[in-house]
Structure formats: C-alpha cells, structure tokens
Image (cartoon, rainbow, N blue to C red):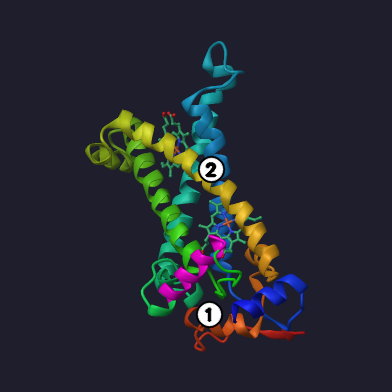
Amino acid sequence: MSTAGAYRRWHHHEEEPRVRVYVWDAVVRSVHWLLAGAIVVLAVTGLYIGHPYGGSVGPASPHFLMGWMKTVHFYAAIVFTISFAARVLWFFIGPKQASWRQFIPTTRARWANLTRTLRFYLLLSVETPGAVAHNAVAGLAYTAVFLLYVVMIVTGFALYGASANVGSFMYLFHGLWPWVGGLQTARLIHHVVMWLLLAFVIHHLYSALLTSKQERNGELDSIFSGNKFLSREEIDSGRDDFGPRKSAPTHVRT
Ligand code: HEM
Ligand code: HEM
C-alpha cells in the first residue's frame, strides 16, 4: 500500500473489506495462556520465596506458608516447563504461523517486514507492517522472551537441585550449578529476569492494545479466538508468513 493511501485510510477511517483469517491454532493459544498464568503464579510465589512478606511468624508447622509457596511455585514451574517444551516442538511441527521462522528472520521478505515495521514504530511511516501472523519486530521480541524463559528454567532447575534429595532424579540438576555461576548467582539471575519478564508484560499489553486499535484487525482478540480480520493487501504482503499449504478456515466478512 502506498504511504499516501495508508494515510488516507487511517486519517479518514475508511473501511475496507476484511477477511477473517485463522492465525493462532489451539496449541499456540493454549500455550500462551498456560505460560501467562504460570508466570503470574510463579512471580507471586517467587516474590514470597525471595522476600517472605507477612503472616509467617512463629513456628512453621501451623501455617506452613513458605512450604505452600514453594510447592505451588514448583507445580507452576512444571506447567511452565512442559508448556514451553510443547511450544518449542510446535516451532518445528506446527503450522507456518507458529514456526520458528516467525521469530528469526531468514527470508528477504521477512527482513523487508522488519524494516517496514521499524519505520512504522519510529513514526517514519504511517504504513502498518502488514504481517499475517507476528510482524518481524514482534517475532524478534518474542525470541528474546523465549530466551528469558530458558534462563528461568535453567536457573530454576539449578536452584531446585540444591534442595532435592540426593537419591531423587531432580538431584541431577545440581550439575547445572557451575553453568549458572553458582547458587547465589543463579538466585540473582532468576530474580532479575523475573522483573525483565514483568516489564515485557507491561509493554506487551500496551502494544497489543495499540496495534489492535491502529490496525483495526482484532489482534487483541486473536489470542483468544485465533482469528484476525485482515485486508486483502495485508494478506498479500504477509503471504510469505502464511502459505497456501495451510488451508486455514477463512471467511469473507465485508
Ligand atoms: C505473563 C503474561 C504474558 C506473556 C509472558 C505473554 C507473551 C506472549 C508471547 C511470547 C507471544 C507470542 C506467542 C507465540 O507465537 O507463541 C504472545 C502473543 C500475544 N499475546 Fe501475550 N503474553 C502475556 C499475556 C497476554 C495478555 C494478558 C494478553 C491480552 C489480553 C496478551 C495478548 C497477546 C496477543 C494479542 C498476542 C498475539 C499477537 C501478536 O503479538 O502478534 N498476552 N504473548
Ligand atoms: C517465569 C518463571 C519464573 C519466575 C517469575 C520465578 C520467580 C522466582 C523468584 C522471584 C524466586 C525467588 C528468588 C530470590 O531468592 O529472590 C524464585 C525461586 C525459585 N524458583 Fe522460580 N521462577 C520462575 C520459574 C521457575 C522454574 C521453571 C523453576 C524450576 C524448577 C523454578 C524454581 C525455583 C526454585 C527452586 C527457587 C528457590 C526456592 C528456594 O529458595 O528454596 N522457578 N523463583
């Protein structure tokens, strides 16, 4: 779309025909919400583990508060780790919109999308990025988030190895200590990365709201329903992301 055309549409709020495109399959959506839910639980319980706040005075046995916090943290950690492992598998065996290629730019079209998106974000252009699934900048940001997940899992399991029974399978993870700079460093990294993730979440909610409103494509709802509402032009410019092989249920809604 020409810049003038994009500006005219944006400025005059011209409606254009939209097509419903099913972008996020059930695995992407379920994993997104399992991970988001787990992060909330892990942050609340983790903050308590790091800095016990109130209520836990006197002997531990009547309230067992720290014990409960740790138990819940570890169950949520299992949900977190398994969900993330499922998403990683889905990078390779899932549909195109869920592929690792959405996150790491490998094609010329993807690099072009990266430049287009950056120009839009830097207010150098009013042309919206026009991706069907993630735009290239969002994809890269999510790559960073996934790497932070790996850091949380590695440091978390290293910490767990410290208190696991010597005969238990989990004790194997004490072998991670040298890799994470020892227990105290692991604890510091685990704590700081939590704040990085929480900072990302604030930005994530804001940018999902903003782009949803700006592009008027139902993006915010898409992580619930799986559907986005895209113009023909957006679909064509994002063709690279969304090959014809995937016969996603589309339905014209003008
Ligand atoms: C702990 C909280 C959250 C984290 C860490 C998180 C992280 C992520 C990640 C990594 C993706 C990429 C998903 C993939 O392709 O596998 C994503 C997509 C998305 N998330 Fe979240 N999310 C969180 C909460 C939320 C909430 C509360 C909303 C909205 C109410 C939301 C809206 C979306 C939308 C609309 C997308 C897909 C659109 C896009 O960016 O292209 N997220 N999120
Ligand atoms: C996004 C995910 C996670 C968040 C936000 C989180 C948060 C935290 C925080 C804030 C602490 C306290 C650190 C401190 O001492 O200041 C903690 C401790 C801990 N976390 Fe996590 N965590 C996450 C994932 C995991 C995972 C995947 C595991 C894997 C088993 C794990 C295992 C542990 C362990 C073992 C401790 C130390 C408990 C102790 O001191 O006995 N965490 N977590």
Question: What span is colored magenta in the figure?
Answer: 110-123
Q: Which mark is residue 70?
A: none
Q: Is residue 159 left or right of residue 65?
A: left
Q: Is residue 180 left or right of residue 132?
A: left
Residue 76 percent across, percent down from the top left: 51, 44
Mark 2 burial class by Cα count in 10 Å: few <14, some 14-19, many 20+: some
With respect to residue 70, does 107 lie above or below? below
Q: Which residue is mark 1?
A: 238
Front residue of this view, candidates 42 and 135: 135
Residue at 52 percent of width and 30 percent of height: 47
Residue at 64 percent of width and 78 percent of height: 4
Front residue of this view, candidates 246 and 196: 196
Residue 207 visible in the snapshot: yes
Indicate yes or no whether the magenta region holds residue 113. Answer: yes
Q: Is residue 241 left or right of residue 177?
A: right
Residue at 47 percent of width and 58 percent of height: 142
Is ligand 2 within 8 Å of the beta carbon of the residue shown at mark 2?
A: yes
| Residue 228, quarter of the rendered image | bottom right
With respect to residue 144, does 113 lie above or below? below
- What amino acid is found at the position of numbered circle 1 in the picture? Gly
Element under disc 2: helix
* Marked residue nearer the N-terminal end (2 or 1): 2
Q: Which mark is residue 198?
A: 2
